[in-house]
Image: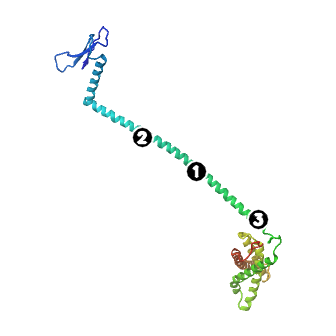
Amino acid sequence: MEFLLFTTHFPITSSTIIKPFFFNTCSSSSTPRSLFMKCSSEGSDNGSLKNIISGMVDKRVEDLLNKEENKGLFDGLEKASLRVEMAKKELAEIKRQEIEAAEMKKYVNYLQTRESEIAECQREMSEARAMVEEAERSLSLNSYGTGSTDGEIDKDRERLESVKAASVSAVVGTLAGIPISLSQVTSTEQLLFPLAITFISCALFGVTFRYTVRRDLDNIQLKTGTAAAFSVVKGLAALGAGPALELNRASFLSHAFDGALYVSESLLVFLFAAVGLDYFFKLNLLSPFPITPSR
């Protein structure tokens, strides 16, 4: 449809009437009609120019909206608008999740920092606890070195504890040395002498062990060193009581083998005695040197 608009050379006022009409440009019914507008300056009370134009525009818009091909377009536009709104909401949700993820990451980093600080504090506490225990051990050795509150050693109690340590060591060591002595004798009378030597040496070992280890009961090197020293002395003494050393290879090998055997046997006996003494110390049946005032 074609619209033809004719202009006028007279002024248009509020009283001017515009009358639209259509006419055919040819006789065929399929030819679109042209729209002409007549302008009149006659005054009328039927409405203003504004109302007429508004009515025409509203009618044309309504005709466009009512067409089937335009309805599909408007439906697509509405769906597109809905998709845009949904996309906006999803974008806002994604932004919110990103903000939450950033805050969570920051919180995790904070917790990791705190965890390292806690581990460092625990390590420092462990070191401080070890230092305190070492200081307490040193203080106990220094404070209780006198053995009594008046600054002097209680000699009677110390003698009694030494006798108890000698007795425990002698009994345990003698029992441990019986199988060794049985392998070296052929009669009961011959068994008495080596057992008496073992009993006396283990009794001396018990007294020495108590004064050597003192209150350092967890020092395994000190305890085994004391037993090894007694074993070497007793083993070499037994070797010296045997045949004299000759300047030949066979004599050297024989004395070396016998010396190792005697030292090993003595070490076994004194280790049993040391274990027995340590066990009695741990049970508080024996008091290490020096005796504390609380005992």
Q: Relative to 137, is 28 on the left or the right?
A: left
Q: Would you say residue 250 is visible in this rendering?
A: no
Residues at circles 2 and 3 in contact by the CB criterion of under 8 Å: no
Q: Which mark sits nearer the N-terminus, 1 or 3?
A: 1
Q: Which mark sits nearer the N-terminus, 2 or 3?
A: 2
Task: Give the CA separation, mark 2 to mark 3.
Answer: 72 Å
Task: Establish if 55 lies above or below 88.
Answer: above
Taking depth in this image into account, of 64 and 262 the one nearest to the observer is: 64
The quarter of the picture where residue 50 lies is: top left
Q: Would you say residue 109 is visible in this rendering?
A: yes
Q: Residue at x 60, y 51 (%)?
A: 114
Task: Give the CA separation, mark 1 to mark 3.
Answer: 40 Å
Task: Give coordinates of residue 176: x percent, y percent.
Answer: 69, 82
Task: Give coordinates of residue 175: x percent, y percent.
Answer: 70, 83
Disc 1 secondary structure class = helix
Taking depth in this image into account, of 191 and 204 the one nearest to the observer is: 204
Residue annotated with mark 3 = 139
Under mark 2, the amino acid is: Glu
Residues at circles 1 and 3 in contact by the CB criterion of under 8 Å: no
* Residue that protrudes farthest toward the front in the picture: 45
Task: Give the CA separation, mark 2 to mark 1.
Answer: 32 Å
Under mark 3, the amino acid is: Leu
In this rendering, the label closer to the viewer, 2 or 1: 2
Q: Quadrant of the N terminus?
A: top left
Badge 3: residue crowd in 10 Å (few <14, some 14–19, many ≥20): few
Q: Relative to 143, is 20 on the left or the right?
A: left
Residue annotated with mark 2 = 90
Q: Residue at x 65, y 57 (%)?
A: 123
Residue annotated with mark 1 = 112
